[in-house]
Amino acid sequence: MSDIGADKGFPRVPGSEPYRGEVDQPTGTATTGHEWDGIKELNTPMPRWWLWVFYATHVFALAYIILYPSIPLLRDATTGLLGWNSRLEVAQELTAAETARAELYNQIRELPVEEIAKSDELREVAFRGGYSAFKVNCVQCHGADAAGSPGFANLQDDDWLWGGTLADIQYTIEHGVRFAGNEDTRYSEMPAFGRDGILERPDIRAVTRHVLSLSNSGPADPQGAEVYAANCSSCHGDAGEGNRELGAPRLNDAIWLYSSAPADIERQIYSPRHGAMPAWNQRLDPATIKQLTVYVHELGGGEASPEDAPSQ
Amino acid sequence: MTTLLDTINNDPRRTAVLVEDATPVNNHEFRADYEARRKIFPSRVQGFYRQLKWILVAVLLGIYWFTPWIRWDRGPHAPDQAVLLDLAHRRFYFFAVEIWPQEFYYVAGLLIMAGLGLFLVTSIAGRAWCGYACPQTVWTDMFIQVERWIEGDRNARMKLDAAPWTFAKWRKRLTVWTLWIVISVATGGAWIFYFADAPTLARDMVTGQAAPVAYFTVLTLAATTFWLAGFMREQVCTYMCPWPRIQGAMLDENSLIVTYNDWRGEPRSRHSKKAIAKGLDVGDCVDCNACVAACPMGIDIRDGQQLECITCALCIDACDTVMDKVGRPLGLISYSTLVDFEHHTQTAKQQGRETATTEQKRVSFAHIARPRTILYFTLWAAIGLGMLVVLFTRGHLDVTVLHDRAPLFVTLSDGSVRNGYTLKLASKTLDERPLELSLEGVDDAVMWTPESETRSRQLAVMVPPDAVRDLRVFVSRPPGAEAVSFTFLVTDPESGEAVRSTARFETGSR
């Protein structure tokens, strides 16, 4: 029975008689000796160009193994004769990128932020650099669109708690707001009028109505106005115009840090919440802070520096 | 190798016809499957088509080599090279025309025209592209001519090829290869001049200061030219190129193809004088194999239409030379349509071979205008004219508006609403251009830029020559405004050209 198997082209036992291929008459090509249901396979040779390419890939592979990191070992891999590796390449590219932008970056480091904003080229560089830094460091609170959220300031609009000139913004970024780790941080605290028993509930409600009336969001309230004049106007101003020295928000505009709902305003007066922001001069280099300053200033609400303001 | 053939009339002015010992190596009867390539040694021919081909080679290569050196003044802000593909600055210059990347549809149109042009030419004159204009044919032709200069004609080359590698053989081969390399480098070298200022690049190439990609391109093109035209030759057409299949499928019975007129040539005979004397029926073909020896594709045209035939028409010249010598009318092998061929075959059968031969025209353009070719030509011309009209009436100003997405709108402290936009102002003139930007469709809106905070309804903008300027613009409307669509209008006060782009103003109100 084993003879039949050999005829059908099953693997040959080593040392046995070699298969003498039959030649297919119509094509003149030898068959492989395999036959299935009467169908035989021609032993067509590969084209020479194909074989040469196939051998060339072997040569290439061998050369690659010798020249480049290739064989994985327990902890790392063979290093290859050229000593190339992808980490080294990344390091080189990073160095090259740093060298390429060194000149502009140095200028940004040296010049005051007002000068940077005046130069078209530097402003553009700083804006884009600031955009990148903002995406990494600031979006967590101020949002990817820099439009903030309740309790976190909107940087797109023209309302500024601590000032919107380049210098103001730079100071705020450098030293933060109510940040315990920085001596020069911007600091202020609104008394907890309700929680600490300074005002009674009806007074708080009345002053809430008065605060709403300052931005024409509700009817005037004489009792509230009296309470406001006694307790609030020293920081928020007689007409609710706010005080940037103290970070006291404007109350007579359309922008609310937390909410414009009466209940929220009442709660803020009763027991205020205070936002905080880290002092970034402990984390970021001065050039990055300047770029962030230019970026935030350029978002649309930036104010002109006093010396640059057109004389009336 | 060769024998002398007796001529029909013993005119002493006519030289004897040599019978070539030529085998159509690519004919399937002579060639087993998977057999290695057998070299082809095309013999020199003289005649009308050979002349035509040399003229075409000169003209086409002249255009290729000299175009980058033509100058065209465009002023100080643009290059002065007539034809330039400026990849670095993404501009394509063609004499007075300048194309930006977003106008790529012109290139698409040109490609469609090239396609239709190919259909048109193929339906009229068969594989004329393959035979006359294809770089593979043109460069192979030149390389074979170099071989002829150095090694001699067909028989000398065959002898040398079979000879052992002596000093003389090395010397000849190295000379041939050197000349090939010179042509190849010139080929690859000319290519790069279309992509950069030619005189500057030429100097940089010589002094070694050009970009590595320039050297790499020259090297790659030179190497492929050397390999394809020097060694691959007809294999490129037969095995590598898809066009023979496409073009073969586009032929019809009215297309001109290189045809052996067997109604006239058969039965062929090498000893026609004796045969005629014996009263045997003899055709015009003296079976001298001149057509086979001349064929750069290694086929015998007398076997009929074949995939390998690139219709280079060299066999026509070879055969005409012989027909002239033996005193028979020219055109035993000719450009002929299948319709003509059938007609002549019928005539030859019914009225005799001589009548048909007398009637035969060398080239028949009788059916050049037929619905198919008219359709191709109309489409081709319509696209071409359409593109010309668009090209010469196109604007030189463009504006695109991108509305800020994050945030869509910003409420300001006075309750008014601000939207931010990035305008892309494209100016396609070659000078700096003062433009005016204004608002249409929102009467209560004002705008300003981050750089200049003066609110107004009109902004003056300077756009650099031949460039796109990104302009950040803020637009604000008073409290309580509803969302609305409006239009940014950009005008050029000097030329009066104006473009508009609609935009949306969002306020958060419904």
Image (cartoon, coloured by chain):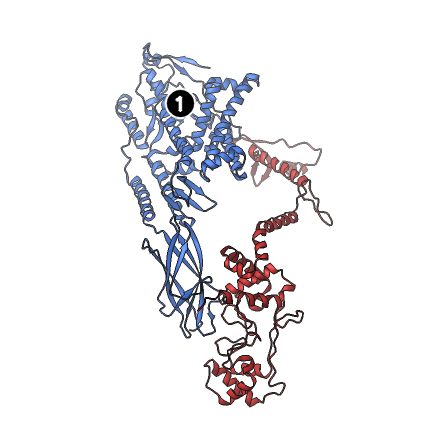
Rendered residue at 53%/22% (across/down): B173
Question: Is residue B266 shown left or right of residue B171?
Answer: left
Q: Nearer the viewer, residue B193 or B33?
A: B193
Q: Position of residue B240 (x, y in %)?
A: 48, 35
B378 over B282 or under it: above or below: below
Q: Residue furthest front?
A: A311
Q: Nearer the viewer, residue B260 or B465?
A: B465
Q: Position of residue A183 (x, y in %)?
A: 66, 70
Rendered residue at 59%/57% (across/down): A109
Label the blue chain with its letter.
B
* Badge count: 1
Would residue B24 be visible to someone looking at this image? no
Mark 1 nearby-residue class (10 Å; few <14, some 14–19, many ≥20)? many
Q: Position of residue B466 (x, y in %)?
A: 41, 49
Splitting the image into 4 quarters, where does residue B64 fall?
Answer: top left
Label the red chain with its letter.
A
